[in-house]
Amino acid sequence: MCKEKSPKCRFCKEITARDKKMSVGYAFLKEKLGLSAFDPSRPALIKPTTRLERNVDHLAVPARIAPKSDHPVDHLLFALKHEDMELALLMEAMRKVSGNDVLAEVTRTPSGQYTRQLGFFWEEAHGRRLEGAPVATGAVVDIFDPKRYVTVPGAASMPFWRVRWNGLGTTRWCATVSRTPLIERAMASDLPGRVRAYAEGLTGAVRERALSFAYLSETRSSFAIENEVPSEQRQAAFVALLHAAHKENPLTEAYLTDLQQATISNVLDRALGFRIEQNYLANSLPGAAGVTYVPPPPGAVGDLMAEMMSFANAMPAAIDPIIAGAISAFGFVFIHPFMDGNGRLSRFLIHHALCQSGALNSGLILPISVAMKKHENEYLDALKAFSVPARERWNVTWLDGDDFEFEYLGSDGLELYRYWDATRAVEFTYQMAEQALAVELRTNVEYLERYDFVSRKVNELVDIRGSDLAVLIRGALEQQGAVSKRRREQFGSRVETKAFDLIEDFAKQALARDPEALADEPGDDMPEG
């Protein structure tokens, strides 16, 4: 570059024009090629800096490193080398790039790490070979940097391009998960192992009752998230599904359809297979303004679900099963393969992944839906991170009543539905799994230990009908140790006043002490006072 910026210098003119545009890499490609994929999470912008700087909301790029032209291939190479992996933008851009331009680049530097990736992605985007491309040379390189992203260990390399596809899925459907501090800590904590260790430390009777309650509460909470109260029949059916997840059941269209039918009470809403019509989610607003999410067109559902099921069947044994479950669950609900019941089935898939991986054995369950219900706003935020920008890619016209006309404004390749950032979904699922263990399971067990302590102590001193005692103990534990006046009046004809007082005293003891110590309590102590 010349020492003085001259209006006659071609190079200076290019830099000046580029400085005005500011954006390079994916952000530049999105504007120049008219890409419909989501905006890059960290756009690359030319800034007055001496080195690349990864900021929270952008990548600061010094002018000397920026691409020297507006040619898409130059910006693709820049993005592959310097930017975060943005698969949807990358694959959509590749479909608009000439094979001759890519061929010229890979012929010039066949051993280049990023030119090899360029050739590989062009072929995957177009579904055909890049005719005339020289056989690549150089060491095999990973597509996803294992230090920055969760990847599949031991992935096979692609010999021609000498690259290794180690993504979470295939080149037809893939999630990206960044190794954030939260995810790194969660992966290192071995949460499934802690669940097993905790369950193995429980006595047989307490363990059985705690798991029974966990299955029931998981079922009720999963329906409650959908603002539904299941009938006894539907409740029992869903509990049976959760138990059946421990059997070796790979996901298929037939299996998922059976699950959908088992969770839907209205016969008319029971599916015969994946949907063949467009569906949508809506809120209370009238007309098109009320449509909050539009899943992919029905013609794409079969292909997308085949990819998603392939991932869900293989990945729980290959990567952390909570990550596999989160991607399966959120990926499923984004595809929305049925007209009804998608939400419940998506949460079931987390349980399915944990069971199929062997992480939860002997009937163990992690009641994640219970935690999700208590953190419903955060759950909705995790879903909206995808659903809100996806809604912007549709033109929805209200016709009449519940009839709408849907026009997809995105690319024919449906890249935004095929390639998505699952980092937030994984973080949320980890947080809910942690709470399911630390709060939900432990709370249930502690309640049972307190209940058993009070029951044992009272039964040693007075004789009360079992069903009456159960009601009175439950009430006392819920009321901070007090037996209410209403309960005393209700049971006064068959329960002595002394018994009410004993229940109160022992309940207060149970609530004030470490639940784990109550099981070893001797059986002949009278309450103090």
Image (cartoon, grey):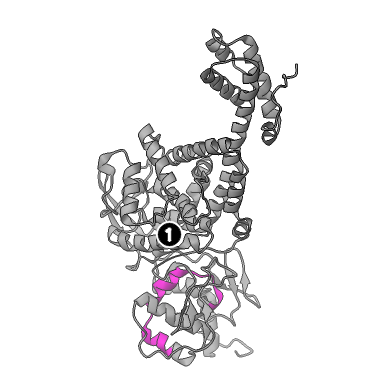
Magenta part mainly helix, strand or loop? Answer: helix
Q: Quadrant of residue 238?
A: top left
Q: Position of residue 444 (x, y in %)?
A: 57, 36
Q: Quadrant of residue 188?
A: bottom right
Q: Is residue 95 visible in this depiction of the protein?
A: no
Q: Position of residue 156 (x, y in %)?
A: 47, 76
Q: Is residue 355 left or right of residue 201?
A: left
Residue at 71% in and 31% down: 513
The answer to whether 4 is drawn above or below residue 472 in the figure is below
What residue is disc 1 on?
A: 312
Q: Position of residue 279 (x, y in %)?
A: 31, 51
Quarter occupied by the C terminus: top right
Is label 1 in a helix, a strand or a loop?
helix
The answer to whether 22 is drawn above or below residue 230 in the figure is below
Range shown magenta? 81-104
Question: In the image shown, does 141 or 181 lie closer to the viewer?
Answer: 141
Q: Position of residue 345 (x, y in %)?
A: 40, 48
Q: Is residue 107 left or right of residue 7?
A: left
